[in-house]
Every structure is written in structure tokens, then in C-alpha cells.
Image (cartoon, rainbow, N blue to C red):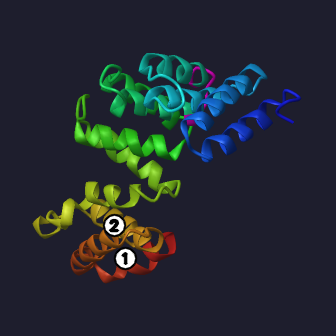
Amino acid sequence: AAQNKSGIAAFYFADCVAGAGGEENLAQAADWYAKSAAYGFSFALTALADMYMHGRGVAKDPDRAVVLCRQVANMGSPPAQTQLGMYYLTGDTTVRNPEKAARWFKEAAQLNYPEAQYLLGRQLNDGNGIKKDETAARFWLESAASNGYEKAYLHTARLYCGRNAQWVNQGLKAEYLAKSYLWLSAGLKRVNSAPEQKEMAAMLAIVESAMPKAWKPDLDKQI
């Protein structure tokens, strides 16, 4: 099918070849990703971009990786926008630009793409190359958690009750106390990471000790 110029078939064939490993196969995969894009499956450019970013099967060329990925991002593809954001945030040092990273994460986040919502929330919360904004960070992390993005649960809960719930004993306002309970409880049902489970369980115990028991039935329904 790939030889008959099916773009999607060429993309999947390139995936198969790349999965076999070895420089020769990687070079062949890069060639088929390029053909896939030429046959009309533009998303293949994101796979080719990754090969240029890391020098796999082709000569390393971070600038070309950005150009290729941006072509797909400009078409409104949230995965490509998120990938481009990651290039600007953690890619080769020659192309890093945290402000551009946040801009592309926001493009994808506004299209309701959970991974981008999470990454934008983390960047805003950490102030990583951009102005720290806890309110915006809370909004985007909570959006990601609402979309079931596993990594977002603990970080969302921390923004409401503080890391290790250190704010609870200082008198947390009712909304934050309820939100802490919601996201910690939901996270314990969804998150598979043992260290995160342990931290959330410890935080939840503190939150429950401070939260009025009469709230629990209604909050449990929301969970």
C-alpha cells in the first residue's frame, strides 16, 4: 500500500521499519516518513521532525526539526503543537525558547488537549521561562485533570492544599478544602504511580481530618 502512494500506509510502514532499530532501518524510516508527507499525510512530518531533533537516521538538525513540526502545528494539530512546545521547552539548547513553548502549549490547551493543558499548567506554576501565574496554572492543571490526564491529579491537588497539605492546618478556605478532597480522592482512583499514591493518601488523611464530615456524601457523588 505504501508503494502505491498511500500516505497513511507509508506512515505505518515507516513506524514498522523504525521499530526494527539500527541506523540503516532508521534512515529508511526517515525516507518513508518524508514520502508519507509527500503523499498527503502531513502528520508524518512530526515523526520526521523528531528524527532530526535527535539525529536518528538523519543528521541532527534541530532547526529543521522545528520547521517541520511547525508546518503541522500551523494546521491546528494539538499533538504537533504540543510536540513543538516541547522542542522549545526541553529540545536542543540551540532552539529552546520557553515563551514560544508556552504559546504553543496554550494553542493546544485551548483545543482541549489534556497533555498541553498539563504542560502549560506546570510551566505557569513553576515560572519556567515565563511569568509565574498560580491562578492560570490551577485552571489549566484542573482542566487536564478533568479530562482524565493522570499526571495532573497530584499537581492540581497541591495547588489547592499545598504540597503535603501543609496549608490545611493553617485554615484552608472551604472551596479549596473541598477541591483538595475531590482531586486527591479522584487521583487515588486513577493514578498508578506508587509514590504519588502514597503522597496523595497522606495528604487526603490531613484534608479529611479538617473537612466537615457532612460534605463527604455530595463530594463523593462528584468523584
State the residue in front, 156 or 95. Answer: 95
- Asked which secondary structure carries label 1, the reply is helix
Q: Is residue 44 visible?
A: yes
Out of 157 and 85, give the one closest to the viewer: 85
Kindly identify the residue that appears in the image at 56 percent across and 25 percent down: 73
Of the two numbered discs 1 and 2 in the rendering, the one whose residue sits closer to the viewer: 2
- For residue 215, what is the image quadrant? bottom left
**Is 36 covered by the magenta stretch?**
no
Q: Amino acid at mark 2?
A: Ala
Q: Residues within 10 Å of mark 2 (few under 14, many from 20)?
A: many
Mark found first going from the N terminus, 1 or 2:
2
Q: Quadrant of residue 61?
A: top left
Q: Which mark is residue 215?
A: 1
- Contact, mark 1 vs mark 2 (Cβ under 8 Å): yes
Q: What residue is drawn where x is 24% and y is 61%?
A: 161
Q: Is residue 138 above or below residue 25?
A: below
Residue in the image at 35% along x and 20% along y: 95
What kind of residue is marked 1?
A: Trp
Report the disc number at residue 171: none
The spot of residue 172 in percent (x, y) is: 19, 63
Where residue 17 sits, quadrant-wise, is top right
Where are the magenta residues, as a range? 73-79
Q: Position of residue 202 (x, y in %)?
A: 24, 76
Residue 81 vs residue 182: left or right?
A: right
The total number of labels drawn is 2
86 left or right, relative to 98 = right
**In the image, 134: left or right of 69?**
left
Q: Which residue is mark 2?
A: 178
